[in-house]
Image (cartoon, rainbow, N blue to C red):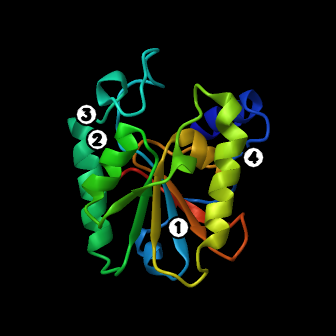
Amino acid sequence: MIRLIALLFAVVLPGVAPVQAAGAIDLAELAKPGRVLLLRHAIAPGVGDPDNFRLRDCRTQRNLDAAGRAQAARLGKRIAALGIGDVKVYAGQWCRTLETARLLGLGPVTELPALNSFFARPDQREGNLEGLRKFLAKLPADGSLVILVTHQVTVTGITGVYPGSGGGALLQLDGSASPKLVGEIRADY
């Protein structure tokens, strides 16, 4: 069903690649050099944001609920248990992405506007994705884990994977703007 939704999504947003044949993988894959986890924010009930959305005002946004906060904290504990040192964490500027990133508890969170949602802003899609591709191209192919907390549209736009809340896609850096998709990290942890 998720693959069907992702394929339909690709029709609605031209240029979105269909879901790639990459199955679910174990979190231990995160410990390998040059890995990037492109993570959808944790559970935040609803779709999109209210009409009165303002970037720095969480009261005007769709936010994590208790299940989402617990989900983010659980994932952070599982990643910490892998013993990966020097994890870099970036997040979009929406409250739900920033809160997910902080609740991972893996270190300081740096805002990265290229990770912002373009769900209700299709005119920003290509600029955001291009900015993210440039960011990925600058990361060292043998570096430590980088976690990018974003939205479903961004994960799908870069990888073709349609993750559930708190799930994502694992990439292997190779010095290009289009790192290799290793597989999907499912949100069933």
Mark 2 vs 4, N-terminal side: 4
Q: Amino acid at mark 2?
A: Gly
Q: Position of residue 129 (x, y in %)?
A: 67, 48
Q: Which residue is mark 2?
A: 68
Q: Could you say where residue 149 lies in the image, as x and y percent from the top left?
A: 44, 52
- Amino acid type at circle 1 is Val
- State the residue in front, 119 or 75: 119
| Distance of label 4 from label 1 (alpha carbons) | 19 Å
User: In the drawing, does residue 135 fall left or right of residue 123?
Assistant: left
Cα distance between the residues tagged 2 and 1: 22 Å
Q: Amino acid at mark 4?
A: Ala
Q: Secondary structure at mark 4?
A: loop
Answer yes or no: do the residues labelled 2 and 1 have beta carbons within 8 Å?
no
Q: Which mark is residue 65?
A: 3
- First in sequence: mark 4 or mark 3? 4
Between the residue at mark 2 and the residue at mark 3, the CA separation in whole angstroms equals 5 Å
Q: Along the line of sight, which residue is nearer the eye, 155 or 88? A: 88
Circle 4 residues within 10 Å: few <14, some 14–19, many ≥20 = some
In primary-sequence order, the first of circles 4 and 1 is 4
Q: Secondary structure at mark 1?
A: strand
Residue under label 1, please give it: 36
State how far apart marks 2 and 4 are (Cα). 28 Å
